[in-house]
Amino acid sequence: MTDWTGSLSLDLEDRLGKTVAKRVYFQGAFKVMRPIYADDSGQVCYYLLNPGGGYLDGDRYKMEISADEGSKVTLTTQSATKVYKTPTSYAYQEAEINLKKGSYLEYLPDPLIAYENAHYKQRNIVHMERGATFLYTDILTPGWSPSGEKFSYDTIQLVTEIYWDGKLGVFDHIKLVPKQQNITGLGFMEGYTHLGSMIAVSDQMDNVLLDALYEMIQAEEADFSFGISNLAIPGFSLRIQANATQTIERILNQCHTIISEKWNNRPPSSLRKY
Amino acid sequence: MNNNLLSLFQLCDSNFPIGSFSHSFGLESYIQEDKVHNQETFLGWLKVYLHEQLVYSDGLASRLVYEALVDNNIQEIWRLDRLLTVQNLPRETREGTQMIGDRMLKLTETLYGLPILSQYREEVKSKNAFGHPAIVFSMVAHGLHVSKQDTILYYLYSAISSQVQNAVRAIPLGQTAGQTITHQSIPELTQAVETIMALSYDDFGMVSPGIELSQMKHERVHLRIFMS
């Protein structure tokens, strides 16, 4: 199918230490704002935005991003992705990311908010050469519902596939269907409402970093539950269950800071949202 | 009962020396948090582990591998071996499964002498494959002409009965309680096979967040009797 509600493609390259777009294209209800350089590192930040204000019944979005050798980019959203009720067909978003060796891409979207009877499916496909770095986060949030019910959405399904050096290295598949699952019970959300994830892949990954992240998160004072573990390829995955977006955001931001200082020798630039 | 089926039963025995008794796949985290502490709470965990993790990973893989063997599509098996391994995000669970798969492969190659097992071992040795018990089991069962449904059913039975034995030791539970749970899990296993037969490729690797978290958390459990 090619009838996208919105699509965008962005190809990045390094020009004398500054990351610039060699091609930007978008159509329909998906846009990128002008590039922002928050510091003198040459890393570029693009805000993705959905001018419609939310994902509706049957909406389909696609983005294709590529980063050439040496380019450094942050992709984020302008605000939370809101998925409203989808009575006939689920809303879908697909991202395909291609990273050349020595490139750095962080994809840090705002939380996903799924409202009553919303069905959302997302697929991220990342192809990385050895020596590339990829950092990804997501936060799943139940939206307000008239009945006050916490899990009023229909389905949230997220699939992330990371190919590393030509081979599948990570396959992550989360599917929450509250009406079919004992969503609050043992094995599922276990009394929590929000789910946060981070996946990082880099040749620079080591156990010192894994332990540093674990210790930092362990010392957080809030009601949450988490697990962090090495991937089958150099990198880690982190999962957090909590009752507030802010708790997950704070932990993910601190992880981002530790990783950035270790891998890029500088703190991350702040992502200003308006 | 024929000899082939009996021959496969040897693989289902929780005493089959492939190290299954060293891996709790996150159960020990729940025991330490006191969320699993008796027959009832353990049965609750077992059902979620079966219906929300095994069904979409080992169970579906076992079916797809069997179908690939029927179609003689060997490349598909190596693809499933990788998918099954990398979808297992918690390191201990992933590496533990790989260790069990490796030992099972060595032992079954000796016992059953099927060419496909030798081929799988070669792939593992040359690091083109990881080795997974669900795949080894399906290869043996297919080689013994056991039906596809029965292959999945017996594989799930062996996975569940190992965990019952682990729970008897770790919680601890009485031997009678253990046998009662195994007995209660029979209709669950039949239901799981029905689910698996109706799944599509898009369902592969779905994981429930709590189960996965417990498996990640186990890395940091200090006093432990299990490796995962």
Image (tube, coloured by chain):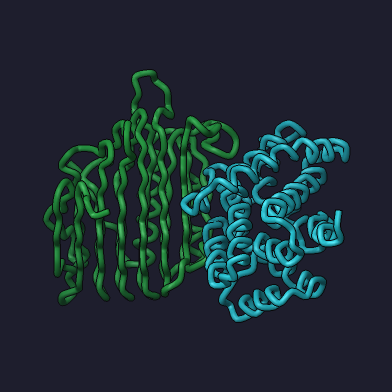
Q: Nearer the viewer, residue B108 or B201?
A: B201
Q: Do we see residue A263 in this rendering?
A: yes
> In the image, residue A142 lies at what x, y percent?
38, 33
Q: From the viewer's perspective, tell me whether residue B141 is left or right of residue B48.
A: right
Q: Do we see residue B159 in this rendering?
A: no
Q: Residue at x 41, y 56 (%)?
A: A160
> In the image, residue B118 lies at what x, y percent?
70, 77
In the figure, residue B194 lies in which quadrant?
A: top right
Q: Number of numbered discs present?
A: 0
Q: Quadrant of the C terminus of chain B?
A: bottom right
Q: Nearer the viewer, residue A64 or B157?
A: B157
Question: Among all residues in the image, which is located at the extreme left?
Answer: A34
In the figure, residue B32 lies in which quadrant?
A: top right
Q: Which chain is green?
A: A
Q: Residue at x 25, y 62 (%)?
A: A65
> In the image, residue A46 lies at what x, y percent?
19, 56
Q: From the viewer's perspective, tell me whether residue B194 is left or right of residue A175.
A: right
> In the image, residue A69 lies at what x, y percent?
27, 76
Q: Residue at x 46, y 67 (%)?
A: A168
Q: Nearer the viewer, residue A102 or A172?
A: A172
Q: Is residue A269 above or below residue A204?
A: above
Q: Is residue B87 above or below residue B180?
A: below
Q: Colour of chain B?
A: cyan
Question: Among all residues in the image, which is located at the extreme top?
Answer: A147
Q: Residue at x 60, y 81 (%)?
A: B126
